[in-house]
Structures are given as C-alpha cells and as structure tokens.
Amino acid sequence: MRPLLFLLGAAAVLTGETEPPHIKAALIAFESGRAAQRDKQFQRALDCFHKALEIEPTLLKAYASLIDVYLDLGHRLEAAASITQFLEIWPDAVHYRVLLGQILLEQNDVKRALAQFSLALRTDPYNPDALLGFASAAGRVGMQDRAAEAIERGRKRYPLDERFKTAPAARQD
C-alpha cells in the first residue's frame, strides 16, 4: 500500500496538483492575461493580471507582465506604481529599480530617482543604466562630483559603450 501512496504523491507533484487552489486560480488568470497580451487585447490583459494579483499578491510574473502592458500602452505612471509594488516583494530587482528611477527622472522627481539609482547600484555597482541614471540625477541636484564619479566608473568598466564616451563628466539637465 505504501508504494502506491508514494507513486500517487509523486504523480501529484509532477502534475502540479500540490499547488493550493488559489495559486492555480492566479496562474489561470495570469495565463489568460498573457494570451490577451499576445493578441494585443491590452485592457483584457490588464484585467487578467490584476485578477491574478488580487488572488495572489506575490505573483511576480503577473507584476512583470502588468508593467510590460502599461509600458506598451505608454502609461508610465501606472507602470511606476506597479514597479513600486513589485519592488516591495523583490527589492533587489535592479532592472525594475532602474526603470522606476528613469520614470521618476522623466517626471522631474529627481531626488526619488536618485534614491532608486543608488539602491540599484548598491545591488549591482556597475550596472550601466544605473550609473547613467545616477549621474543624470546627481548632476540635476547639484552633486557634480558624484555624477562625474559615476560617469568615470562607467567609462572604465564599459570603454566601448558610447553612452559613457559622450556623457559629460557632470550633467546639469
């Protein structure tokens, strides 16, 4: 009898039947959203991703897809709000931290952008986009020495990256 129970348990694990019902429901909503996204049905995709997150608020791939759709639609502030929620769950997600910093810079919220780039650089000290964003934000708040340091660090690390070659040592946007 024990081998039969073991086999049934192993089959359940292999088929994903061990997931709680709410996770299954969230994944179904997520997959529906992905299908809608592929079909360029953006409002339906947004609805599905929101539903998935309502069911399971920590479903990172639903946040990532939600952010992508907002960006595809040009809704950068909504994307920023979703990125903020995403970062509450995964604070070391450098890509999203940099993206949030870039959106904040666009909105002239320079000090908050500077904080996002600083946090990104704490996780990934040589991230080129974080270095450039930090330099831009630092220059805009009057920290030309810190901006110049970031550009110089980027030039040394990425000597072929045109963005660092052409970037002034300290920007005053």
Image (cartoon, rainbow, N blue to C red):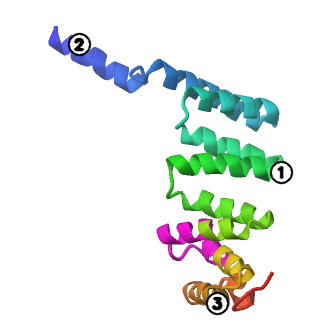
The quarter holding residue 98 reads bottom right
Location of residue 141 with respect to 122 vertically, above or below: below
Query: Around disc 1, counting alpha carbons within 10 Å, would you say few (fewer than 14), some (14 to 19), or many (20 or more)?
Result: few
Q: Is label 3 in contact with label 2 (beta carbons under 8 Å)?
A: no
Q: Nearer the viewer, mark 1 or mark 2?
A: 1
On the rendered structure, is 123 left or right of 111?
A: left
- Going 51% across and 55% down the picture, which residue do you hit? 91
**Alpha-carbon span between mark 1 and mark 2:** 53 Å
Which stretch appears magenta?
Answer: 116-132
The secondary structure that most of the magenta stretch takes on is: helix
Which type of secondary structure does the marked residue at label 2 adopt?
A: helix
Location of residue 113 with respect to 7 vertically, above or below: below
Q: Nearer the viewer, mark 3 or mark 1?
A: 3
Which type of secondary structure does the marked residue at label 3 adopt?
A: helix
Which mark sits nearer the N-terminus, 3 or 2? 2
Disc 3 designates what residue? 148
> In x, y percent, where is residue 48?
69, 29
- Going 61% across and 65% down the picture, which residue do you hit? 116
Q: Which mark is residue 25?
A: none
Disc 2 designates what residue? 5
Which mark sits nearer the N-terminus, 1 or 2? 2
> In x, y percent, where is residue 78?
75, 46
The type of residue carrying mark 1 is Gly
Location of residue 124 with respect to 81 vertically, above or below: below
On the rendered structure, is 161 left or right of 173?
A: left
Q: Nearer the viewer, mark 3 or mark 2?
A: 3
The quarter holding residue 142 reads bottom right
Residue closer to the observer: 1 or 135 = 135
